[in-house]
Amino acid sequence: MNDFLKQWGEAAYTTTGFFWMALWAFVLGYIISSMIQIFVTEKRMQKTMGGAESKGVLLGTFFGFISSSCSFAALASTKSLFKKGASFISSIAFLLASTNLVIELGIIISIFLGWQFVVGEYAGGILLIGISWILIRLINPKKLIDKARKNLEKEDGDSGMDDSKDWKKQMQKEDSWAKVGKKYKMEWQMVWKDVTVGFTIAGIVAAFVPDAWFQTLFIGSGQGNTDFSFFEILEHIIVGPVAAFVTFIGSMGNIPLAALLFGKGVSFAGVMAFIFSDLVVFPILRINAKYYGWKMSLFILFLLFTSLIGASLILHYSFDLMSLLPDPSQVQVQDSEYFKINYTFYLNLAFLIISGYLIYLGFFKKKDVDSKMGEMAPKSQLLENILKYAAFISYIWIAGGLIVKFFIQ
């Protein structure tokens, strides 16, 4: 019983430490994302992505890079862009970029995993887009694409934000920043459950799951081994998305768990595949089926999973060739002094003040300012309820564990 209480306290403390480590990065990332979504509207994107294929792919990648990292927001935006005339591949480029190349994800990865994984994330995102482009050109699923467009034509027209105003002038107005504040709150509303559950799972795994479990699940991992055979790396790449499917948590919430996997000896390729796999889980499959039909949804699943395998392999062997593969011993996610007075403390303090001002501006001083929010993909109510109650249970677990650690043990 004493061992359990000790592990419970460590799990809760580790989860809280993870939140504290990442807080300023979340705030910074979502402020930037909110600004971009208010000042760069979807109509601007639609106007520029319907031309030549190569130009459309580049623009889709760029617009994805500056968009929200929320998978459900990305799915809705992708559907809208595709419906309004963007090519299928440029829409896929937008989807992949908005879930792999976004600024806030890179910041979180840098905190937990280091610069090599940041480079891997952005280079891998480009590889995912490139491989998908090649596969689409080779397979040429014209009938599926035409049928998907017909499915979307049955929907009501999409409403868009006003695109007539100069974004530079809008940035000088307090009303515009009130809209940023409202969007910022919405960003947190979209991810708080995923982040809470994901970080709690990471704390529990760190405290309770023995290394032998990871060594069984990921062949050849552990015991300081960094020399993997091709088939061991391939197994890690396939098992990584399966692990992500089981947790069904978005990429932002999964980063601490990815760091734990790497610290336990999982290969670089396996960890990258785990991070890349937020678009190959069942909730995403179901939403794509609702938008485009099941055949197209399964094709997109095949497309993304195949691209994920290829990108992870290319990254691993490219980094190995350049002697850039990161050392698992350098990833220290468990720290006995998460809350010491250092740059993290001051950054968290500063960004909490900025958050407070944006919320005050959007919901108190300028609460009457109208802000049309972007469309969200239709989430499963059952899954949302499961995540909501799991998040509430997580808070109870964390509070209980902290009481055990500091007042009982």
Image: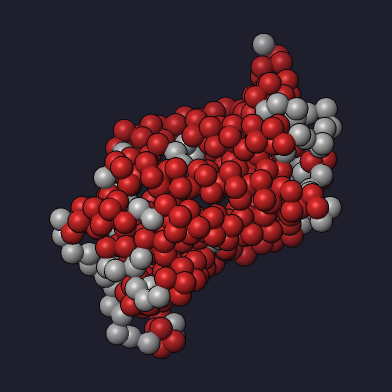
Quarter holding the N terminus is top right
Q: By what rule are the colours in the image chosen? A: secondary structure
52 over 81 or under it: above or below: below
Check the picture and name the quadrant holding the C terminus.
top right
Left or right of 134: which side holds 175?
left
For the point 18% across and 64% down, the residue is 157
**Residue 354 at x, y = what percent?**
54, 67
Residue 248 or 269: which is nearer the viewer? Answer: 269
Residue at 44% x, 38% y is 281
Could you tell me if residue 348 is visible in this image?
no
Task: Tally the numbered discs.
Answer: 0
Residue lying furthest top in this view? 1
Q: Give residue 227's position: percent from left, percent from top.
A: 82, 36
* Residue 362 at x, y percent in the picture: 38, 68
Residue 121 lies left or right of residue 145; in this view the side is right
Location of residue 16 by image quarter: top right
Which residue is pictured at 68% across the width and 28% down the height? 218
Quadrant hosting residue 154: bottom left
Quick check: 305 above or below 75? above
In the picture provided, is 204 more to the left or to the right than 222? left
Query: In front here: 263 or 122?
Result: 122
Whether residue 245 is visible: yes
Residue drawn 73% across the image and 57% down it: 115
Quarter residue 159 falls in: bottom left
In this orientation, which residue lies closer to the viewer: 242 or 27? Answer: 242
Image x and y of residue 172, in percent: 44, 86
